[in-house]
Amino acid sequence: MRGKTVYVLNGPNLNLLGQRERAVYGEATLQDVEQRCRAHAAGLGLEVVFRQSNNEGELIGWVHEARDKAAGIAINAGAYTHTSVALHDALRAADLPSVELHLSNVYKREAFRHTSFIAPVVNGVICGFGVDSYVLAISALSALITASKKG
Ligand code: DQA
């Protein structure tokens, strides 16, 4: 049901969580992240559609789908965060409560990670808390959805 469903979208290379650059991204796998998201969202009365793709077009398709089917979007767009005008446009068009998130603190890292094409079209950004960034993003989304229903 739209009012209770949030899309948690994951971009390129996040399928390798728990295997790649563990010093940066931690030990948890994407499956572990999905379980944390589902458990936390359930406590807030939300259902999660959790997806990952290495393909920019597929992510854009899911943002379009969320436009019709979801109450909000939490997105870790991975490296597309720093490159994708198309994801910027899709999120703008979706016009839903939305949160950008990252496991790592991108501002402590290379300069090319300091630019986000997505940040200007979401409600807020959470980064640097590892898997907790997902949990915090879902809490923020829940508050935004509640506020948008009152408004
Ligand atoms: C990331 C940060 C991005 O800069 C990077 O390209 C990723 C993961 C994060 O979750 O910390 O793939 O989005």
Image (cartoon, rainbow, N blue to C red):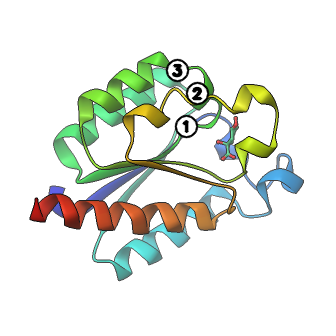
Seen at 89% across and 55% down, the residue is: 23
User: Which residue is more in the foreground, 93 or 15?
Assistant: 93
Residue located beneath label 2 in the image:
80
Seen at 65% across and 30% down, the residue is: 79
> Residue 56 bears which disc, if any?
none
Is ligand 1 closer than 8 angstroms to the Cβ of mark 3? no
Q: Left or right of 107: which side holds 76?
A: left
Quadrant of residue 90 within the rendered picture: top left
Q: Left or right of 100: which side holds 60?
A: left
Q: Quadrant of the N terminus?
A: bottom left
Q: Left or right of 105: which side holds 86?
A: left
What amino acid is found at the position of numbered circle 2 in the picture? Tyr
What amino acid is found at the position of numbered circle 3 in the picture? Ser
> Contact, CB < 8 Å: mark 1 with mark 3?
yes
> Residue 84 bears which disc, if any?
3
Q: How many marks?
A: 3
> Contact, CB < 8 Å: mark 2 with mark 3?
yes
| Percent x, y of residue 111 | 78, 28
What amino acid is found at the position of numbered circle 1 in the picture? Ala
Compared with 44, 117 (above or below) is: above
Residue located beneath label 1 in the image:
77
| Percent x, y of residue 130 | 69, 61
